[in-house]
Amino acid sequence: QVQLVESGGGLVQAGGSLRLSCAASASIFSIRTVGWYHQAPGRQRELVATITISGTTTYGDSVKGRFAISRDNAKNTVYLQMNSLEPEDTGVYYCNTIPSVYAWGQGTQVTVSS
């Protein structure tokens, strides 16, 4: 069973940066589109960034221009560089393929203070 492990979250002031990582226990990121999902407190999980097998990226309107998704196939890892963080970015971040065919990891908590 493939495991997804997210890391890199933390507490940061508004305007700061974080780099999230998502490591998979198998080479799934090189063969599937991958996404980062954000679950704000009391809200449903939503997709904020994706990267295809060919490297094409897409972003939600709320993070466009501030976040960047990337992938290292050799390390089975996907990253999310988060810049100019805003309090609205607070929440738990998860990664998964699209569609999300694998069990969800524990996520990584991001808290942005104003």
Image (cartoon, rainbow, N blue to C red):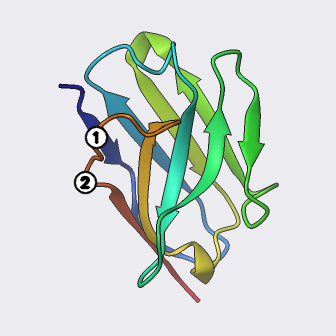
Snapshot quadrant of residue 21: top left
Question: Which badge, 2 or 1, comes first in the chain's sequence?
Answer: 1
Frontmost residue, 5 versus 18: 5
Inspect the image, locate mark 1, and give the three-letter code of the amino acid beneath it: Val
Q: Is residue 31 above or below residue 103?
A: above
Q: Label 2, label 1: how many angstroms apart (C-alpha)?
A: 7 Å
Residue 5, disc = 1
> For this view, does 28 lie left or right of residue 17?
left
> For this view, does 84 lie left or right of residue 92?
right
Considering the image in quadrants, where does the N terminus appear? Answer: top left
Frontmost residue, 54 versus 103: 103
Snapshot quadrant of residue 6: top left
**Residue 9, image x and y in percent?**
39, 59
For the point 49% across and 14% down, the residue is 73
Frontmost residue, 18 versus 49: 49
> For this view, does 102 lie left or right of residue 62?
left
Give the structural element (helix, strand or loop) at label 1: strand
For the point 82% across and 55% down, the residue is 65
Question: What residue does disc 2 label?
Answer: 106
Residue 96, disc = none
**Residue 44, image x and y in percent?**
47, 72
Discs 2, 1 touching: Cβ within 8 Å? yes
Inspect the image, locate mark 2, and give the three-letter code of the amino acid beneath it: Gln
